[in-house]
Amino acid sequence: MGFKHLEFPKDSVFLVTGGAGFIGSNLCEAITDMGYQVRCLDNLSTGKQANVDLLHDRENYTFIKGDIRDLDTCMQACEGVDFVLNQAAWGSVPRSIEMPLLYEEINIRGTLNMMEAARQQGVKKFVYASSSSVYGDHPVLPKVEGQEGNLLSPYALTKRVDEEYGKLYKKLYGLDTYGMRYFNVFGRRQDPDGAYAAVIPKFIKLLMNGEVPTINGDGKQSRDFTYIDNVIEANLKACLASSEAAGEAFNIAYGGREYLIDVYHDLCRALGTDVEPNFGPDRAGDIKHSNADISKAKKLLGYDPEYDFAKGIALAIDWYKENL
């Protein structure tokens, strides 16, 4: 169970792009804890200096301030690297609808730069962040790889394109690529602030401050909320996966389903408050229901997520209580 028992050659070097972000900083921390060398590449556009500062005194950790939109930076960052965990991207469906050109530049061109640098520098495995948003309007639950609908946002399109490049880089150049289709990841260090903040940290912070959160839509939308440690496990297991599993994308989730209104009431109970939320309009580009079939990742990556929603949310709330 989990990832702490996983073993790599002792001189392994990992590059985590977007390593100052929520998922990236957790990956950097976990891998340095395991004793391997980690390089973190981030331009701090959405990542936080504070996330990076946590690790700067560790001997097996190096921070590179740089941008994946610059191929030379990617080439230098990949030099001597065994495993790339490419998390650098701009998230948020609504923001991508406002800024499609920027999303094209960062999420598509940036990822392609990283794949190309990894190929030229002889990287063994290239694991990259995709998203459940690639399922678009396909109505069937649970979501199964290979059954995707019409895309609903520029963000979703960028992730679909990354997956197609991942497939091509395996086929044409033999680079082992693995796409991680994340489903609503949450946990320590996820940013509660800003207009595009994820729903769980945002609700927790507002409730802790005695403010009234707003739920977009009727609260009856459902999500496969996935605790951060499950995501760390998936990334590391992809680095150990067979070449036969490469060129593919995998659902990375717990395989559960929570309704937003229930999550809201769970948070209220856990925080000892009882506030009725406000309800706002639906958000453009949002998928109504999301629930993952994780059997492909289990079979091909050996993924075996340890943290269900209840276990994860308890840990997340504890972290926010200490850190907000």
Image (cartoon, rainbow, N blue to C red):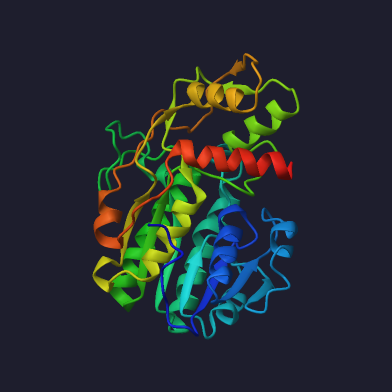
Where residue 140 sits, quadrant-wise, is top left
Nearest the viewer among 323 and 75 is 323
Where residue 127 sits, quadrant-wise, is bottom left
Looking at the image, residue 25 lies above or below residue 150: below
The spot of residue 297 in percent (x, y) is: 30, 55
The spot of residue 45 in percent (x, y) is: 69, 56
Q: Can residue 173 be seen in this view?
A: yes
The answer to whether 58 appears left or right of 216 in the picture is right
- Give me the residue at 62% from left, 56% from top: 21
The answer to whether 164 appears left or right of 58 in the picture is left
Nearest the viewer among 92 and 172 is 92
Nearest the viewer among 145 and 199 is 199
- Give me the residue at 70% from left, 63% from top: 52
The spot of residue 9 in percent (x, y) is: 43, 82
- Give me the residue at 58% from left, 51% from top: 90
Q: Report the number of numbered marks.
A: 0
Looking at the image, residue 177 lies above or below residue 322: below
Looking at the image, residue 262 lies above or below residue 180: above
- Give me the residue at 51% from left, 81% from top: 81
Q: Is residue 95 visible?
A: no
Quarter containing the N terminus:
bottom left
Quarter containing the C terminus:
top right
The spot of residue 320 in percent (x, y) is: 67, 41
